[in-house]
Amino acid sequence: MRRQAAPFCRPQSATASTSRSCATWKVHKYGACRICVVEQLSPPAKNLQASCMVEARDGMVIETNSKRAQEGRRAMYELLLSNHDKKCLTCVRNQDCEFQALGRELDQEETHTVRHLLVRAGDTSTTNPTQEQFDAAETKARELWDQWKAGEATEESFATLASTTSNDDASSRSTGGLYANITSTSSYVEPFLDWALDSARKEGDVDLVKTEYGWHLMYYVSTNDPVWRQSTTAALQNQDYEQLAESATQGWNISQGMGMKLVKA
């Protein structure tokens, strides 16, 4: 890292760029929002550092955009967002808002959708499956894979198979083993997550993945827009619907209820 007199998140900095919140709101070296956190490698620091509070010095090694720093910023943004009124659609600053722009900056990662079928090693009471139990689970998973390939071998047939044979919970079975909006910060077991996020993954890929629970028969559904874009699209669609409903009922007296009393001859 080249020497830098100003803290890393100051707008005038030319050598590093990090997300920031308090700096754009003219709060000087406050360190409260923690959006500008960076990872200090040398001299080593245990915790992420608020870059607005740390002056650069000769010999420092800073990762401004490491995975750990990105995860820290996203976590802090979610905390700030939880205390936000979220009336964005009616706000005069909608689409011209630094807080919205910050959310887009922090969440450019594509999301991923998969289906999976779990063949558990042992049963739900098993905490440390034996190798024999893992081997039995793998054999069963491969049999189910062969069964799927012998049929239509489509996403729909995979969903049907997952809903009837998976050892996952009822919620997962009810959706055909569907898991959507998977990102690098999702809290799935590492082998499952690594498979879903593999950059070489293509729609329709199928494979077996071993985790601490047993063997997962995986089906890759799609790569999708970032969560912020999906949320924005849904919000705009909802706004369009409300405007359509309002225009359709304008000039009419609307009564809500049940029964024949609402029927007029």
Image (spheres, grey):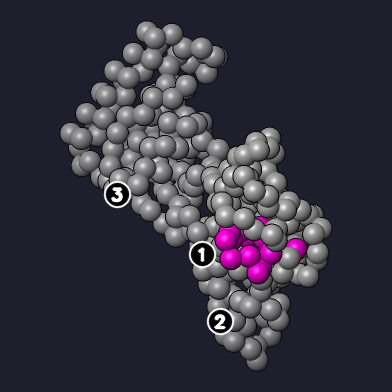
Query: Horizontal and vertical percent for residue 148?
Result: 24, 34
Dot 3 or dot 1: first in sequence order is 3
Q: Is residue 39 left or right of residue 144?
A: right
Question: Compared with residue 113, is residue 139 higher up or lower down, i.e. above or below?
Answer: above
Residue nearer the viewer, 152 or 51 = 51
Question: Compared with residue 234, is residue 151 higher up or lower down, i.e. above or below?
Answer: above
Residues rendered magenta in the picture: 8-22
* Labels in figure, total: 3
The majority secondary structure of the magenta stretch comes to loop
Element type at marker 2? helix
Q: Is residue 211 left or right of residue 29?
A: left
Q: Is residue 53 left or right of residue 251?
A: right
What residue is disc 2 on? 244
Element type at marker 1? helix
Determine if residue 35 is in view. no
What amino acid type is highlighted by mark number 3?
Glu
What residue is disc 1 on? 229
